[in-house]
Structures are given as structure tokens and as C-alpha cells.
């Protein structure tokens, strides 16, 4: 079976408070985008799983890949044969695009379908949430207003199809742990859920990503790149997640110039 796990962006991101379990309470809109990895798998006749990763090189942090961890979670309750797995990475890591979470969630869904496990969507979300705070979003893979640590969802609308989403990724990554160590939780002044429903032309003054205030001084290039998106005609531009990728929403197909043209990934 071959699947194509897609990335997401965060439209707005409020860090509301730090929880007793060490996670942070957030408000955000998770929005799927067309940038995708490729994930293939089929049963093998070996006595172990084989994962082959190509495409964008992913540095090892010493932990098991999320795809294999997703498989481990299902094997606690179901008998699944050993697999040959090929993962072709196109979604940049350390970018706030949720590539690893998407791979794991799409793999859960694909295994459920391929081996007829009969797991409900709600149960898949619970299993996905074990793997990462944004992982459960990719089970439905549709625009969602998210709260909690990013695993509690409310339906929200899609953008009009006339809009183009452009993503640029600088040549550096940002550690999520580092980003959260710098941010200061604060109660948002307005409701992101309601602001998202307002005309896109108003988002620039209403919708923000709390990480920008604390990360832009460490990475001034991000502030410059965000302004270049606006200079290119973006109606709204922001960093996604804890970075380092940024996106712009345009009502035309932009002709980017200079550095941001070279760094465009979608």
C-alpha cells in the first residue's frame, strides 16, 4: 500500500498556560496543506520490520521513528505481520509542519484499512495522541480548531479555493523544546476561533503566533522572511507551529523573488 501523508500549518497559535503534566495548553487552527511525504509498506518474510528512509535527511535523536512507534501501538492489540516500509521524506523537519506526526497518523489509518482491524476514528485519534500532540489531527486531516495540548478538536471551515498557500523553509531548524522554553504563556485577548471566521483581510491585525515574539529575536531572518511574504502580496503571513517554516496566503499565484523564492517548499 502507498499513502501520501501531508503537512499542516498553524493559523494562529496561542500558548495559554503551562499544565501540571509539563505540556502547554494551546489554541490554534490546524490546517492541512498539499506538501506530502510518501509512505509504502508490504508484509515481508523476515523476522523483523525494515524501515528505509530516503529524501530529506532526518538526523537521528536516538529515539525510534514515529512510524515504527505507531506500529508498536497497534501490535499491543492486533497481530500484524512484519513489514518492509519505505518512507520518502519531502516535508522538512524542525519546521512546524507536522511531518513526523502525519507519517505516524496516516500509517495508523493505513494499517487499520489494510489489515481490516476495525478501529474507529475516535480510537485511532486516542492512539495517535500518544505519539504526539498534533498527531491526532491527521486522522481526520481536515481544518480544526484545536485546544488542550493540541488533541481536542472543533470543526472549522476551509479557506476559499481561490487562495494559494505558499510555504518557505529557511536553512535551519528550530527545536520544539527550545521554542517552548522561551515562550511565556498568556491569555489571548480575543477568541482565535471567532477571529478565524472573520475576513482574511483582518487576520494580519487579529491572528498571531505567540512563538514569533520570543523566537524572532533569536532568529531575525524569520522576521525578514515574513515581511518579504507581505512584500510579495500575501494577505496574511505567519510562522507555523514553533517554526522554522513560514507561510503566506495569497489571492493569486505569487512570483516570489530573491531568497524566499529559493526557499519555497510549497
Image (cartoon, helix red, strand yellow):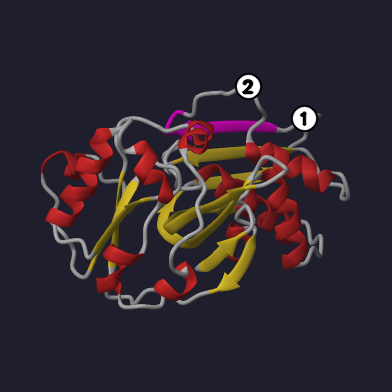
Please state the horizontal and vertical placement of residue 95, each as a whole percent of the image. Answer: 42, 40
Please state the horizontal and vertical placement of residue 134, each as a whole percent of the image. Answer: 59, 52
Residue 244 in sight here:
no
Residue drawn at the location 77% of the way across and 34% of the way down = 45
Quadrant of residue 260 within the rendered picture = top left
Q: Main secondary structure of the magenta part?
A: strand
Magenta stretch holds residue 52: yes
Residue neighbourhood size for the residue with mark 1, other residues' Cα within 10 Å, grouped as few (<14), some (14–19), many (≥20): few
Q: Is residue 266 above or below residue 53?
A: below
Helix, strand or loop at mark 2: loop
Q: Which residues are magenta?
A: 50-57
Helix, strand or loop at mark 1: loop
Magenta stretch holds residue 206: no
Foreground label between 2 and 1: 2
Q: Earlier in the sequence, mark 2 or mark 1?
A: 1
Q: Is residue 229 above or below residue 140?
A: above
Residue drawn at the location 50% of the way across and 60% of the way down = 28
Out of 2 and 160, give the one closest to the viewer: 160
Please state the horizontal and vertical placement of residue 75, each as a whole percent of the image. Answer: 83, 44
Please state the horizontal and vertical placement of residue 14, each as a whole percent of the image. Answer: 48, 55
Residue, disc 1: 48
Question: CA separation, marks 2 and 1?
Answer: 19 Å
Out of 6 and 215, give the one closest to the viewer: 215
Residue neighbourhood size for the residue with mark 2, other residues' Cα within 10 Å, grouped as few (<14), some (14–19), many (≥20): few
Residue, disc 2: 62
Amino acid at each position: 500500500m502507498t499513502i501520501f501523508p501531508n503537512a499542516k500549518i498553524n493559523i494562529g497559535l496561542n500558548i495559554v498556560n503551562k499544565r501540571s503534566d509539563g505540556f502547554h495548553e494551546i489554541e490554534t487552527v490546524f490546517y492541512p496543506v498539499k506538501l506530502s511525504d510518501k509512505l509504502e509498506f508490504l508484509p515481508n518474510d523476515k523476522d523483523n520490520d525494515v524501515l528505509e528512509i530516503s529524501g530529506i535527511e532526518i538526523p537521528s535523536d536516538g529515539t525510534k521513528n514515529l512510524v515504527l512507534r505507531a506500529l508498536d501501538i497497534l501490535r499491543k492489540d492486533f497481530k500484524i505481520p512484519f513489514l518492509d516500509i519505505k518512507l520518502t521524506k519531502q516535508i522538512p523537519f524542525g519546521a512546524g509542519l507536522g511531518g513526523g506526526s502525519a507519517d505516524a497518523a496516516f500509517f495508523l489509518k493505513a494499517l487499520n484499512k489494510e489489515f481490516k482491524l476495525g478501529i474507529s476514528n475516535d480510537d485511532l485519534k486516542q492512539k495517535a495522541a500518544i505519539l504526539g500532540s498534533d498527531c491526532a489531527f491527521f486522522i481526520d486531516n481536515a481544518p480544526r480548531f484545536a485546544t488542550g495540548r493540541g488533541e481536542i478538536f472543533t470543526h472549522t471551515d476551509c479557506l476559499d479555493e481561490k487562495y494559494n498557500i505558499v510555504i518557505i523553509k529557511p536553512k535551519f531548524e528550530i527545536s520544539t523544546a527550545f521554542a517552548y522554553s522561551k515562550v511565556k504563556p498568556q491569555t489571548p485577548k480575543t477568541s482565535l476561533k471567532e477571529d478565524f471566521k472573520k475576513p482574511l483581510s483582518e487576520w494580519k491585525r487579529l491572528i498571531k503566533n505567540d512563538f514569533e515574539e520570543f523566537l524572532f529575536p533569536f532568529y531575525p531572518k524569520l522576521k525578514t522572511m515574513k515581511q518579504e511574504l507581505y512584500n510579495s502580496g500575501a494577505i496574511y503571513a505567519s510562522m507555523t507551529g514553533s517554526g522554522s517554516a513560514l507561510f503566506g496566503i495569497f489571492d493569486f499565484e505569487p512570483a516570489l523573488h530573491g531568497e524566499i523564492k529559493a526557499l519555497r517548499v510549497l
